[in-house]
Image (cartoon, grey):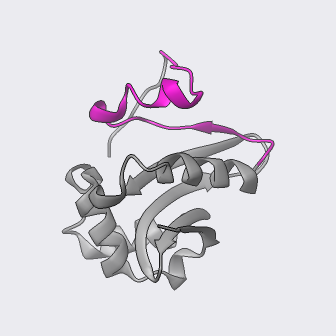
Amino acid sequence: MEWKIERAHGGDLDLAEVREVYRSSGLGERRPLADEERFEQMVRNANLIVTCHVDSELVGIARSVSDFSYVTYLSDIAVARDYQRQGIGRALIRATQEEAPRAKIVLLSAPAAAEYYPHIGFSQHHSAWVLNP
């Protein structure tokens, strides 16, 4: 199986395909998939998106907000369930780094993925804070 990783613009993505990747990956449980307007804004307003396609099928996405200098906030990384554990997530993170090579990457891990990130070079930060709307 060959996959293609490339940078994408949120306005060019098919939201139904993106929504299906989020749903299939398990990330959809913590994202507003049912709120179509909010989900669309979430995708369209991210300024750094990297996708993975197998043939023409979208199977992975890394959605970030970056200043391309100091920090990139990796908001979401989602890989469709049938394509997980094949290196796609790691490749999406690497491609995100390549787009902003001087910026550190910061992310908030899903509880089920917390053990994954140390294995690929992330260090845990114990003073993150969240202020919900």
In the foreground, 13 or 88: 88
Using residue 67 as the reference point, say whether residue 116 is left or right of it. left
Using residue 76 as the reference point, say whether residue 80 is left or right of it. left
> Residue 111 at what x, y percent from top left?
29, 31
> Residue 80 at what x, y percent from top left?
32, 60
Residue shown at 64% from the left, 48% from the top: 94
Using residue 80 as the reference point, say whether residue 71 is left or right of it. right
* Above or below: residue 91 compared with residue 102: below
> Residue 77 at what x, y percent from top left?
44, 51
Using residue 28 as the reference point, say whether residue 39 is left or right of it. right
Residue shown at 35% from the left, 34% from the top: 113
* Residue 5, picture quadrant: bottom right
In the foreground, 92 or 107: 92
* Above or below: residue 31 compared with residue 59: above
Residue 91 visible from this viewpoint: yes
Residue 38 visible from this viewpoint: no
Residue 125 highlighted magenta (yes or no): yes
> Looking at the magenta stretch, what is its main secondary structure?
loop
Residue 39 highlighted magenta (yes or no): no
Most extreme residue toward the top, as rendered? 126
| Residue bounds of the magenta highlight | 101-126
